[in-house]
Image (cartoon, rainbow, N blue to C red):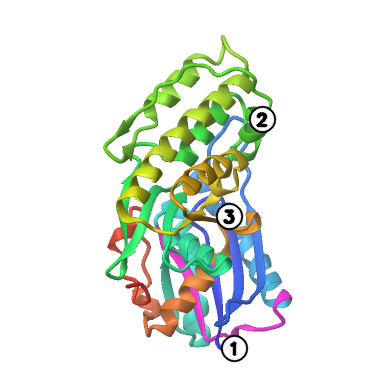
Amino acid sequence: MTLGLGIESTAHTFSASVVDDKGKIYANVKSIYRPPSGSGIHPREASRHHAEAAPSVLMSALKESNTDYKSLDFIAYSAGPGLGPCLRVGATVARFISAYYGIPLVPVHHGVGHIELGSMLTDANDPLVLLLSGGHTMVLAAVNERWRVFGETLDLTLGQLIDQFGRAIGLASPAGPAVERLAEKGTSYIDMPYVVKGNDLSFSGLLTSVKRKILSESQENLAFSLQETAFAMLSEVTERALALIHKKELLIVGGVAANARLQQMMKLVSNRHGCEIKSVPIEYAGDCGAQIAWTGMRYFKSGYTVQPQRAFVSQSWRIDEVKLPWRS
């Protein structure tokens, strides 16, 4: 049995997870930085949280999995994209453990981690993927050992759109669950900008419009209208991609994948194309060590590791630049 440890630290979450090569998750421990209400993630403060949380999170993950560092076959870490100070904390911790115990080290792309964990947990084989998080809004499919982009945001991600609206009405980031609860209480749609360019999306005008209406409209109706418009835009580009490449699986991953209304709308899209929809379980939708550990396992099994002194981080690392030896 091969056993690996994964460390996630791209933004607000510091997490560690232990998995084996059969996909069993023995531990998935998290500590989340919570900014003040109405505020976003401050990279320096989040990185300080990560540095303070790292020892207890790692020890808890090892204890829950009944293992120790010497029993690990590799250690993986999120190398990007993300907030620089936060990424560096995770990379530094992983590099130290790797060097001290002589454990092979595996850098992992955060977005690839979301997809590969989601694929494993849902048994998705060759899906069209919706990667929806604070750092990504992309429609993807695997072609020639890479995740190829069939549509993406031109400015804000869907997660950023929701978080920035949440902050504007006094919520703390990540604001997705709170905005979803507000939207469920909305009863009236307010006209919003709908911007799809080819198969790409633009959310900046939508954010500007909803912020201008904060003093004149109810928060519930604004949240409802924001979600309906953004999700309809995403449904359009997803349906166009399905019509183009005829995939029979639609996999939704990333923190926004937990939104029930989004899943409902995507179900309608998939039904029209005879496509099976698969959503990552809610407890693994957000950032977590399991996504890094499992993707690290796939790289380790493919023979890819780096020396500790060659560990790197990249704040702007496009997913279609990443080679995936296990994807055709």
Q: Which amino acid lies under the numbered mark 1 shown in the image of this protein?
A: Lys
Which segment is the magenta one? 64-80
Q: Nearer the viewer, mark 3 or mark 2?
A: 2
Residue 306 versus residue 149: which sits nearer the camera? 149
Q: Which residue is mark 1?
A: 70
| Residue drawn at x 55%, y 41% as measured from the top left | 262
Q: Is 217 on the left-hand or right-hand side of 231?
A: right
Q: Which residue is mark 3?
A: 285
212 relative to 150, above or below: above
Q: Is label 3 in a helix, a strand or a loop?
A: loop
Of pointers 1 and 2, the one earlier in the residue sequence: 1
Q: Residues within 10 Å of mark 2 (few under 14, many from 20)?
A: some
Q: Residues within 10 Å of mark 1 (few under 14, many from 20)?
A: few
Q: Which amino acid lies under the numbered mark 2 shown in the image of this protein?
A: Glu
Q: Is 251 on the left-hand or right-hand side of 49?
A: left
Q: Is 75 on the left-hand or right-hand side of 61?
A: left
How far across and how far down the image is residue 31, in percent? 65, 56
Real-space Cα separation, disc 3 to disc 2, in angstroms? 20 Å
